[in-house]
Image (cartoon, helix red, strand yellow):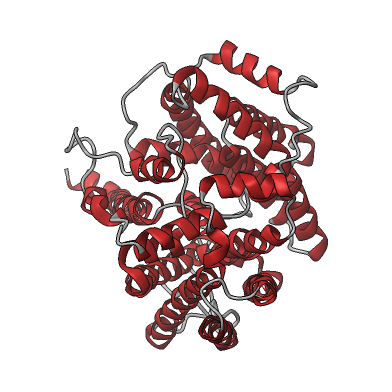
Amino acid sequence: MRVADGRIAPVRVWELVALASLLGVYLVTMALYDEAGTPAVNLFGAIALGVIMLLGAVPPAMREATVIWTPLFWFRIATAAYFSFGNAIVHFVNDESRRMMEAFFQDYESLMGKLNAVITLGALLTLASAWVLDAAWRRGAPQVDEPPRSRLEVGEPSRLLTVGMGFLAVGGTVKFLFTLPATLGVISFTLPGALGALALLADAGVYLLAVWAWRFQPRLLWLPVCLTGLNVALGLLAFSKTEVIASIMVLALGWLSKGLTWRRMLVTAGVITITFALIVPFVAASRTEMVRRYQSLQGAGLSERLEIASFYLQPTSGLDNPQQTGLIRFSYVNGSALALALQDNGSAGGTLATLPAVFVPRALWPDKPDMTVIGREFNYLATGNEESASSPGCFAEAYWDYGWLGLPLLMIPLGLILQAWSLVSLWIIRGEQWLFFPFCLLGMKVGSSIDGFMVPTVFGTAVLALVAFVALRLALRLNSQIVAAGPSGYRAR
């Protein structure tokens, strides 16, 4: 199968040149001054990083909308959001917000120049490795004019509806039988990663239903809209901004599937940004209350979570807090700077210690370590609170583990994973292979999760997706062979 063509280059040479030039500016500034750099260079450098990332992501998506399903697209968007906008806004926050950031790590400003250099080098290595893999693929890929067509084509509304309902049934069952009870503290054991992936099928189902309704039955749009509302409500009760944003994004992507325009992209971006800014203070306050009551983010039942939520909405609950929580939640400057300082002081991160565990399912290793515990450990180093989790972002994590050497060691594999996954996502979307559509959502999640730790968010998810993808391909091939041999086999008997 051929999933890349000459119409779209996932990484362009000008991007690499621009990032290398920006890195050079940071290194020269550090040589002339110190690791803090200068406020002007740090501000305009952060803005330049965002411009490079967005110009690499948006124009190709405008030319062909399938690009929005690739992990590389979301890697660029996430980098622009967290490490461009997030690094720039620290120059404009008020004093109360600055004190809040300093409470996590007081001396973050003394490492701003170095941090920006680390981020830029990380982005450069990620995109460069993706460019190399894409160049090798283009030389070896067979020349096929059109991608293979799936039997489940968009032109067949009944098949699209069937697949969507099937995904919704399986994902919804997992979500209500396992994920939601775990959130409410009904079950206390660690859920296997495979169950979390199966719950993602519900989002895939909502998307396919939205596409089906928008294209074939506009009067039934209320169905995916109501399902999205339910998912948003569950995300709010779980005090999870990720669940809320993901639920809205899935419906928005169904709308964007009608055709990508600047207006639709700006409306989508505006809705997501406003929603994020509104729910972040709510989630932060609710989680603080959860930790105060239970020393954990789990354990409260439905009625108590509603009580916590209603308390936040009261006028005296702190809505007038001068901390610009919605804005500074975009910034990982303080956490990233802390990771750099820890490495420079001889305290390496060791975040890859649980990497071997991603290759063994929990069913075969009941005492398999919790790969997400590193987030709580990192938060404890900063605040003394191990009941909440935080992260420095993947670029600073690489430096925390191995210094400057950690950036090629971790970012090159990241770029290869994102590029390979992008090729598969294009094959799925262009060929309308809807049974494989959940792998697109997983890829988007990985590409946009560069604010997390590498082992659970990238390597663990990639291994799980690879095993599931190969298994599904083999199952479909075996089924085709059985169907093809069925009549002759029957006559032979």
| Front residue of this view, candidates 404 and 232 | 404
**Which residue sits at x=78%, y=64%?**
261
In the image, 10 versus 242, the foreground residue is 242
- For the view shown, which residue lies furthest in the right direction? 263
Taking the spot 69% from the left edge, 32% from the top edge, the residue there is 223
| Residue drawn at the location 39% of the way across and 56% of the way down | 458
Asked whether, in this view, residue 295 is left or right of residue 67, the answer is left
Relative vertical location of residue 445 with respect to residue 415 in this rendering, above or below: above
Closer-to-camera residue (70/5)? 70
State which quadrant residue 75 falls in: bottom right
Where does the image place residue 485, in percent across and percent down from the top left? 27, 52
Say if 128 sits above or below 353 in the image: below
Q: Quick check: 377 left or right of 362? A: right
User: Residue 140 appears in which quarter of the rendering?
Assistant: bottom left
Q: Residue at left 57%, top 87%?
A: 21
Q: Is residue 430 visible?
A: no
Image quarter of the N terminus? bottom left
Residue 341 locus on image (x, y percent): 42, 61
Evaluate whether residue 83 shows in this view: yes
Quick one: 230 or 84, which is closer to the camera? 84
Image height of 462 relative to 56, above or below: above
Mark count: 0
In which image quadrant can residue 158 be found? top right
Q: In the rendered image of this protein, does residue 112 appear above or below residue 206?
A: below
Q: Quadrant of the C terminus?
A: top left
List x then y, in percent, for residue 332: 55, 55
Expressed as whole percent of the image width and height from the top left, the position of residue 138 reads: 44, 84
